[in-house]
Image (tube, helix red, strand yellow):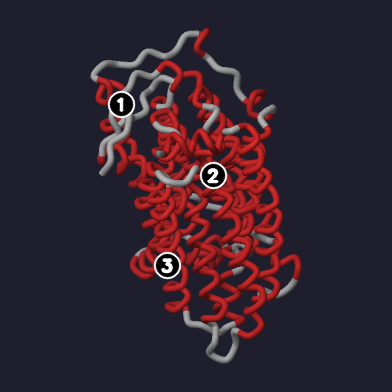
Amino acid sequence: MERHPVPTDRPAAVAAPVRLTALTFLVLGLVQAIWPLTMDLYLPAFPTIVADLDTSASAIQATLTAAFVGMALGQLLTGPWSDRVGRFRPMLVALAVYLAASVACAVAPTAGVLIGARFAQGLGAASAAVLTIAMVRDATEGPRMVRALAHLQLVNGTFVVLAPSLGAWLLAVMPWRGMFWILAGVGVGLLALTAWALSPRRLRGAAAAAPGPADRPRLYAPLLADRRYLLAVAGGALVFAAMMSYMASSAFLFLEHFGLSEATYAVIFGGHGLFMIAGAQVSARVAGRVAPVRVVVIGASALLGAAAVATALGPFAGDGRVWLFIVPLFVFTTAFGFVNPALQEVALHDHRDRAGSAASLMGATRMVAGSAAAPLVGAVGAATPTVVGGAMLVCCALAAVVLIALGRTARATGTGAAAASAAS
């Protein structure tokens, strides 16, 4: 595996050069993976939780919303904090919050307590996940950052593929509370791994002191004044909204509208994860020859085209021809994986000294967009290929407009040419 400089406990502006090893990649990927585990692992247990806590389905669905809100807030809090004190300490705190919240979920006596615990769980999960992106930005930029993020996607994407099936299997052998005890165990393991593998002393051979007041960068004000950053954030949020408008309605679409079995649905869901991983690896391969902003524009065009084809072919996908709808959706998820690493690099490119704040604002915006898009299809009507594809198409069309404007902004400032020159 290619080696890069590794992040340290000090912000990038004052960090000493170090090396990013396979172990560091693995630990950062595992930390990122708590996001899909937290969101997807317990989904098959919803009916069981409703019965056990003697509550309504809407109350248990609110646990999902609470986690989204916690993820958004957690990123906004932790990113700026890490720009001031370094990445290591906030990472440990975030994982400790995640561990405590997972235990609270496991012993929750009522739906209200479970909702609150899920909020805290999202808080810790997002805080840890966003710091991995900031740490990669501390160490890399340009094509090297795209490749590093794509490597992380190998680990993270594996859990995206496995989480729903793993949750169904666990539910067959243990009560639903056992899933949260497993997540608590994950928290313990990640705390130990992080304290060992990502400590400043281990990475640099000496403890890293926290920066002084003069080293503390301003936080969100410079980001909000950067048109290029805002376009990248808005485009990423719209792309994520397109994905969530499909994912949130996929079970109703395939199980009820198309009448597929749960096993077939699990295969389709897993296929999306695999194609997402493949798209990220293609992005890594072209990163050395194509400027990241150009990768973003290509990916946005592919997303729009795939959504348009899915919408057009969806009405003809009945009577054993469901593949007419599934194939363009696989193209869509491949393009989603392809565009994400490059989009994150473009957004954070000019903000190395405030990478935590930049990554957190981008991630929180995606969480808000995803939570808003999740009920979008249900508000329009039944989950049909036309309705689902139409929601994706609208989001992708808006994203394409924003990201094409991003590409023009980069060309106007010469950023794209500079990145391409650096890539060569």
In the drawing, what numbered circle is on residue 270?
3
> In the picture, residue 222 is in which quadrant?
top right
Q: Earlier in the sequence, mark 3 or mark 2?
A: 3
Q: Give above or below for 116 relative to 163.
A: above
Q: How far across and how far down the image is residue 319, in percent?
A: 57, 91
**Alpha-carbon distance for marks 3 and 2?**
24 Å
The reply to whether the C-beta atoms of the residues labelled 1 and 3 are less than 8 Å apart is no
**Alpha-carbon distance for marks 1 and 2?**
28 Å
> In the picture, residue 217 is in which quadrant?
top right
Q: Secondary structure at mark 1?
A: loop
Q: Amino acid at mark 2?
A: Leu
The N terminus appears in which quarter of the rendering?
A: top left
Q: Residue at x 44, y 21 (%)?
A: 11
Front residue of 101/193: it is 193
Q: Nearer the viewer, mark 3 or mark 2?
A: 2
On the rendered structure, is 164 left or right of 24? Answer: right
Front residue of 415/218: it is 415
Q: How far across and how far down the image is residue 20, in percent?
A: 30, 34
Q: Nearer the viewer, mark 1 or mark 2?
A: 2
Using a 10 Å C-alpha cutoff, classify the residue at mark 3 as few (fewer than 14 neighbours), some (14 to 19) or many (20 or more): many
Q: Give above or below for 127 relative to 104.
A: above
Using a 10 Å C-alpha cutoff, classify the residue at mark 1 as few (fewer than 14 neighbours), some (14 to 19) or many (20 or more): many
Q: How far across and how far down the image is residue 134, in percent?
A: 46, 33
Q: Which residue is mark 2?
A: 343
Q: Amino acid at mark 1?
A: Ser
